[in-house]
Amino acid sequence: MAEPILVEHVSKVYAGGNRALEDFSLEVEAGCFLVLLGPSGSGKTTLLRCLAGIERITAGRIVLGDTLVADGVRHVPPERRDLSMVFQDYALWPHLAARDNVAFALRRRGLGGAARRAQAVATLGLVGLGGLEDRFPSELSGGEQQRVALARALIAGTGIILCDEPLSNLDADLRERMRVEISTRVRAAGATTVYITHDQAEAFALADRLGVLEKGRLVQVGTPEEIYTNPATAFVARFTGLACELPVQIRARNGNGLVEVEPTGLALARPLSARSLTPDWSRLDAVLTVRPAAVRLCAPDSDERHLRGTVTDVAFRDRGYEHAVDLPGLARITGVYAQRRTARGENVGLCLDPEGCLVFPAY
């Protein structure tokens, strides 16, 4: 049965004063698939280890289901927290076959050895490893080992599953297939899941709710659509995918929160109205962030263009081409998609969609 998770004002300070988590608060509803996204050093792994009981928190409290498991004084050890964990490096016993690695998770359930092994074989079949139950980890590929680790987490039947960047060691094609496998199997189990990653595409594909971490703090939490459409800060916008950032100056704003901006040192072909998330502007200098989907190529002398630049790189991507365009003396815009290839060195115009442009204060 899925269990809710409550994290209240948690801090974690390591020796030497390194603050990995700072006043971190989070609620996860029972059955939710929460993905925590952040760069290295943002605190996401530390949080997961605190939830698991591997690390002791310095302050605050953690409640799993109805049980207070940590409050800075009280610390329930990992084996008594009734949760499962899928590790980045698989964490399989090398001397145990796949069946016995999975069955190990049932040892605390009071089942006999034969019953444990039978359930393990059945669960390995669910993750596509039927017939491989007698192989040792050294005889399995990376993807197969991760499936064993997933089966071990699922068979335990816990209300909470923690996933520590479980796909980061896999190649791109296998990573995508395992992403679908984890999403399908974990949701079928009905467990509350906290999954951490630094991969934006992976986060958006998996999450019911998405949290973004920066320097040990939870900056924003919401649905993937909310995070992408209305990022709370320039950092959130940047970390969830931008074609570019442009230094701009606000020329005007109206009562609906729309502003007209011009890139510093470069006249726009026409003003661009861009949504502002910060209602109280204290200065005219700002940063315009542009999503990749908000940029398209056009003729350099087109009346609809906002900017003009030169194509510096082009790469074939599936059904079309991605271009990198240099704006002289200003920035480089990347990930500009078009169905037709534009040659390197060619001058182009760029049209910006206001819905994919966001303005933030310049710090």
Image (tube, rainbow, N blue to C red):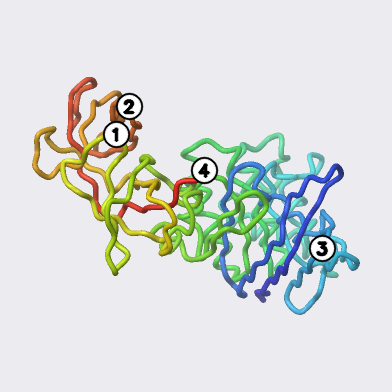
Q: CA distance from mark 1 to mark 4?
A: 43 Å
The reply to whether the C-beta atoms of the residues labelled 3 and 2 are less than 8 Å apart is no
Q: Look at mark 2 in the image and give the residue it sits on.
A: 329
- First in sequence, mark 1 or 2: give its number: 1
The reply to whether the C-beta atoms of the residues labelled 3 and 4 are less than 8 Å apart is no
Element type at marker 2?
loop
Element type at marker 1?
loop
| Of residues 225 and 219, the one drawn nearer to the viewer in this rendering | 219
Q: Look at mark 3 in the image and give the residue it sits on.
A: 59
The quadrant in which the N terminus is found is bottom right
**Image quadrant where residue 259 sits:** bottom left
User: Which marked residue is nearer to the observer: mark 2 or mark 4?
Assistant: 2
Q: Residues within 10 Å of mark 1 (few under 14, many from 20)?
A: few
| Of residues 253 and 275, the one drawn nearer to the viewer in this rendering | 253
- First in sequence, mark 1 or 4: give its number: 4
Residue type pointed to by label 3 = Ala
Q: Look at mark 4 in the image and give the residue it sits on.
A: 175
Q: Residues within 10 Å of mark 4 (few under 14, many from 20)?
A: some
| Of residues 312 and 193, the one drawn nearer to the viewer in this rendering | 312
- First in sequence, mark 2 or 4: give its number: 4
Residue type pointed to by label 1 = Gly
